[in-house]
Image (spheres, coloured by chain):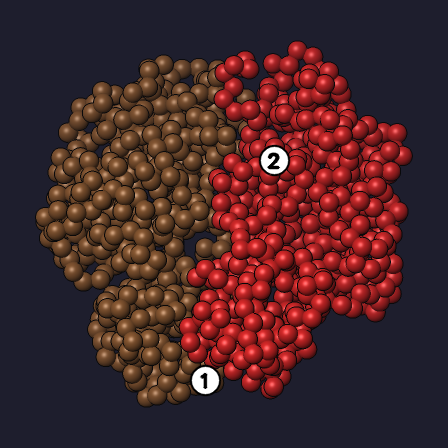
Chain colours: A red, B brown
Amino acid sequence: MSEQTRTNPSQPRHRRDIEQWDMETDVAVIGFGGAGGCAAIAAADAGAQVTIFELASASGGSTAMSSAEIYMGGNGGTRVQRACGFEDSTEDMFTYMMMCAGPQADEAKIRNYCENSRAHFDWLVDLGVPFKDSFHQERAIMCLTDDGLLYTGSEKAYPFAQQAKPSPRGHNLYIEGDNGGPLFMKIVTENVEQRDTITVQYESRALTLIIDDKDEVVGIVIRKDQQELNVRARQGVILCAGGFVMNEEMLQKYAPMLSKGTEPIGNPGDTGSGIQMGMAVGGAAINMHEGFISIPYYPPASMTYGIAINDKAQRFINEDVYHARLGHAALQQQGDRLYFIVTIDDYGSYEQLNFLFAPIAGTGETVAELEEELQLRQGSLQQTITLYNEDCRAGEDTLYHKASQWLKPLEPPLVALDITPGRGCFVPFFTLGGLDTLPTGEVVNPQRQVIPGLYAAGRTACGVVRRAEGYSSGMSVGDATFSGRLAGRQAASAPRR
Amino acid sequence: MSEQTRTNPSQPRHRRDIEQWDMETDVAVIGFGGAGGCAAIAAADAGAQVTIFELASASGGSTAMSSAEIYMGGNGGTRVQRACGFEDSTEDMFTYMMMCAGPQADEAKIRNYCENSRAHFDWLVDLGVPFKDSFHQERAIMCLTDDGLLYTGSEKAYPFAQQAKPSPRGHNLYIEGDNGGPLFMKIVTENVEQRDTITVQYESRALTLIIDDKDEVVGIVIRKDQQELNVRARQGVILCAGGFVMNEEMLQKYAPMLSKGTEPIGNPGDTGSGIQMGMAVGGAAINMHEGFISIPYYPPASMTYGIAINDKAQRFINEDVYHARLGHAALQQQGDRLYFIVTIDDYGSYEQLNFLFAPIAGTGETVAELEEELQLRQGSLQQTITLYNEDCRAGEDTLYHKASQWLKPLEPPLVALDITPGRGCFVPFFTLGGLDTLPTGEVVNPQRQVIPGLYAAGRTACGVVRRAEGYSSGMSVGDATFSGRLAGRQAASAPRR
């Protein structure tokens, strides 16, 4: 097949059309973020000669841009969990994560993740990743102290807490502020550099996979220094090239509902190239419509005493859930305005400490005044707050089951923030769809048959996290590092071809 | 490539591995439902020699199982619309259909559909499809009289009516009852049989596409009488093999959220085989998570005077919308019960004339009594109905904008139906995802480049209908026949290879 007649740039190249290999390796890893770094380390430690190809001129990926909490637990608890007094069970973690993924759950993958999560913690610690044995009590989106452990999801909220005993599973690196990501990637990069059997090629763009006559993946075409290199991968290619949040065409095709009023979060390499290369050799891309969408209405934690309403003045969720679960529910509402209502006292430090940048939509010395200012139907907000305040006094949120610790009557004066996406507040999103893989990282086709020689991990694969409704901070870096490590190990166990 | 090493049953076969063609045709059409029949007729009328391969022993597909309303209009109105006094404009139809499809809209496809819809009506009439020039006034899911025209969507409901002048566009065949589908396929089948240049092969299963060295589709492998036949298609293959609602594995992979408490609607051939064959040669499958999901709470039309509530006793939509738009909104609600509340009078003929089979969840001589019987939070339903009744008396639904003609205070005694999917009521669903195509029917890859020789139509393609929220009866058969016809014409214009 000549270059001229190829209709699809991701279309695989055939080995028979390759005159010579320009480079050879056992395992080719595409992308040097958290997933790629862990894949390379695991493959090298299992005896493979590894080459990482990274588009940018340095390692990092989206992991380095994140705060790098890592979602881990189970098996009686990680060292940090146990030190902080949490005996986390594998079953509770499994139940929670299955509820998070809902109908989209990949049970085998979640099972494997939970059963091996504590071992994953130990593996990371062995790499040198530091976690302090201390618990961060405050409800937060990310930990700005150096504490090692915090609640980062909806574990303590309805309906999760009723079915799985809550434990905090967000592991935060031992460093102040939100600098976990850079530190994590520094440690991973040092580990890569210490291993003689890993080579890193920066400024190297993966173009397309190379398949043989049996449709097995045997290499990859790399563009570097304006040249195309045919790279033979004797044991396999691991795609760790991120998601597709930076590819407007793919967003429009697969997830157009995610981008209205929202801000894409990711690194510039999140163009979906890994997913496309995998699809071009028959890999199934699944869950492509789903994304993380959040309305980060806390911190401060005191915002949790407030209520979220739609433009009918109806509440729509228990406000003690994770911010992406509230964000998802918010986007399902009919109407064109969404508000978050708190007392003037609980609004408190919001102006200093907020990720949302939501403008004030109205204030009221009485509920009726606020209702009028927000142009809500007369009586509607008064009804909602009357019921809610009754529930607060009785200590039970009869409608949405917000935990009693967050129930406190909304006594005026009240403040309403406009949390409508696209109206001044910050609504981040990224994609959650990708290549379907087995727990081993092997990419499968729509019939769930393995495509020999091809692996995917991190956001290029569709991992354990499937929906905004069930996201918890730390699940992305948790899944990226875990799935990368497993894919590396699996590839290194393949026979050399 | 030998049979033994092929990992994917849909994996295309290569022409170089085909020793001889067992059969030759210009255009191969896969599937003989509404899309396939119209594709074959159009291709033949454009000069091609056509062969239809149908899995079953007779024509029909899902079209024959439907009532076969056809959604058409624009350009000043079809003959029937004009006779009934509706001067439908293309722009109003376009605006409505764009709103229906929402962010997932394929603007070019919808534009083309609307601009050529009146001509499509004429084409169908030329085939012999009969429509009576009469308007069915009553709000209905399908027309059980022989009237030719009725409202079949949310055209007169908020927010559609505010942005596009409503016209009825559901065209119903001139036959009593819901027998439009069988009559339609009878007429299409007769048209096929009348054309010497069309051959039909029944009991013929399409297995996989055949591609040449340039990745062009040049044929298809058919299994018939326990033999595999390599069929050469000189001008192209048109996949009209239905959707994937009968393929549990694909549903689990792509649309697991659709099947909870719902009933798949389709024909046994809706196994997604056409979509899979297209994907295997690089075709993009899009919108795969979306489906039609309906809670058919009317007829009788008098049900529209009622309100739908979630288990917080909150309304969540204007109840004069199309039943699938209400169904979609219902499934977005938190909580585990959904009710439809009407007065005992409006409940009226529901027991005789209903498609929903929803059990009665409660009755009340007062609202408080019903509230208690439904175990709703004390005061919650009373609040909702107080506001709603005030709005009814004022003639404006301030919350959800149900049209004033449907506003009438809910005066006890009241009846509540349990419309929770999976609890006795009937919630049909089918898939809306499929191969991405150009308006011509040409299948495209993820980069939207045409895959030469491959076409798709009907439910195998992702057509103009993209969401339950924006479905209107008649859009499926409208799209199937329209897209089939265009694909047939386009294939017949390709050079013979």
* Of A413 and B320, the residue lying toward us: A413
**Three-letter code for the amino acid on which mark 2 is drawn:** Thr
* Of B427 and A155, the residue lying toward us: A155
Residue B419 in sight here: no
As drawn, is A133 to the left or to the right of B478? right
Residue A10 in sight here: yes
Residue that appears at 59% across and 78% down: A413
**Residue A488, relative to residue B217: is it above or below?**
below
**Residue A42, relative to residue A386: is it above or below?**
above
Residue that appears at 82% across and 27% down: A199
Callout 2 secondary element: loop
Q: Which residue is mark 2?
A: A271
Mark 2 Cα-neighbour bin, 10 Å: few <14, some 14–19, many ≥20: many
Callout 1 secondary element: loop
As drawn, is A279 to the left or to the right of B227? right
Label 1: chain letter: B
Residue that appears at 68% across and 63% down: A351
Residue A396 drawn at (x, y percent):
60, 81
Quadrant position of residue A273: top right
Residue A333 drawn at (x, y percent):
47, 62
Q: Which residue is mark 1?
A: B379
* Of A282 and B10, the residue lying toward us: A282
